[in-house]
Each structure stands twice: as C-alpha cells, then as structure tokens.
Image (tube, grey):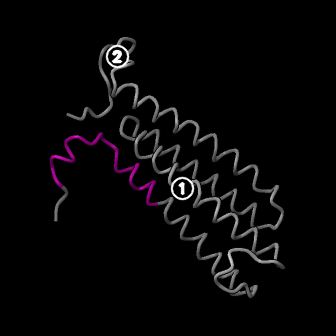
C-alpha cells in the first residue's frame, strides 16, 4: 500500500533520514538486549532477576542496556519533533547520539563504569543540540520567532 500522498506533502524534504535514524536507534537497543541475554546465559543469571548479586560483569552489561531504555523515549521525541524543522541536522545529531550510546555501552561492558563517560558526553551533547532543534520548532510553530526570521518558518504548519 503506498504512503498517503497528503502525508508526504506536509513532511519536510529529507524527513526519511530522521526515520532511518530512529530505526537505527531501535537496532542499537536490540543489539544491547541480545548482549544482556547472552551474558545472562553465560554468567548463569536466572530470570526474573534484573541484576546479579555476584557478577559485576553482568550488572554492567544490564545497566548499559537499562540506561539506554530509560533515555530512548526522550531521544526519539527530540529526534522526531526536531526533525520536523531540521530533518538533516536532526538525523546527523541522532547518529552522533547513537555512536555516543555505543561508546557508552562498550565502556560499560569493560566492567569499569567510569569508562562509559566519554560516550556519555558525546551522547548528551547531541541530545542537547536535538533539544535546541525541538525548541526551535516549537517556537517557530507558535510564531514566536517570526519577527526575527523574516516572518517565515521552515517548520511544518499544521492546520
């Protein structure tokens, strides 16, 4: 079934990059979940235990995944809404966020939680910039910035 052409008319050019970035973040979370399952089996951590009383290695792998799950809804919101005005910038920032998330995760997997910090910094800088894109979209959509931006907006206008 073809995509509704009216929907395509209101979506900004390049919004597909935003969608692919969101899909990439879901695959990243799936990869982390698979790693938790493998570690659970290898280290003998039985369900339904979220954490192990004896394996710091498992706890670090599980915590990296849990941290990602905790932040994923906010990331997706910022990516999808910010991408309505800045699709290519948001997609690039989303990829930077994902790379930071992977570095964060691999650092955590070492069993030394401090090694997650570099990836965390990268991830949170991208997240803050996405917050700026989303805030700009909201301001433009409400007409708050029209006086300083030539009275036009690059954002979608919902009627």
Disc assigned to residue 145 = none
Quarter of the image for residue 115 reads bottom right
Quarter of the image for residue 142 reads top left
Q: Which residues are magenta?
A: 4-23
Element type at marker 1? helix
Q: Position of residue 123 (x, y in %)?
A: 63, 47
Q: Please give the residue where the numbered disc 1 appears in the rendered image.
A: 72
Against 142, residue 83 (above or below) is: below
Q: How many marks?
A: 2
Q: Nearer the viewer, residue 158 or 126?
A: 158
Q: Please give the residue where the numbered disc 2 appears in the rendered image.
A: 146
Q: Position of residue 13 (x, y in %)?
A: 30, 41
Quick check: is 5 in the magenta stretch?
yes
Separation of marks 1 and 2 at Cα, in angstroms:
32 Å
Position of the N terminus by quadrant? bottom left
At horizontal 61% and vertical 59% (from top left) the residue drawn is 68
- Magenta segment's dominant SS is helix
Classed neighbour count for the residue bearing mark 2: other residues with Cα under 10 Å, few (<14), some (14–19), many (≥20) = some
Against 128, residue 152 (above or below) is: above
Q: Is residue 24 left or right of residue 103?
A: left
Q: Position of residue 67 (x, y in %)?
A: 65, 59
At horizontal 61% and vertical 54% (from top left) the residue drawn is 99
């Amino acid at each position: 079934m073809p995509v509704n052409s009216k929907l395509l008319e209101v979506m900004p050019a390049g919004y597909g990059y935003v969608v692919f970035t969101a899909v990439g973040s879901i695959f990243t979370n799936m990869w982390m979940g698979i790693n938790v399952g493998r570690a659970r089996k290898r280290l003998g951590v039985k369900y339904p235990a979220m954490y192990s009383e004896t394996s710091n290695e498992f706890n670090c792998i599980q915590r990296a995944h849990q941290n990602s799950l905790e932040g994923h809804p906010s990331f997706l919101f910022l990516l999808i809404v910010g991408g309505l005005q800045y699709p290519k910038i948001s997609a690039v920032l989303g990829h930077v966020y994902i790379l930071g998330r992977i570095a964060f995760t691999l650092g955590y997997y070492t069993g030394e939680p401090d090694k997650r910090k570099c990836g965390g910094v990268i991830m949170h800088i991208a997240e803050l910039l996405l917050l700026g894109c989303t805030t700009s979209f909201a301001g433009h959509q409400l007409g708050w910035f029209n006086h300083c931006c030539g009275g036009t907006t690059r954002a979608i206008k919902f009627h």
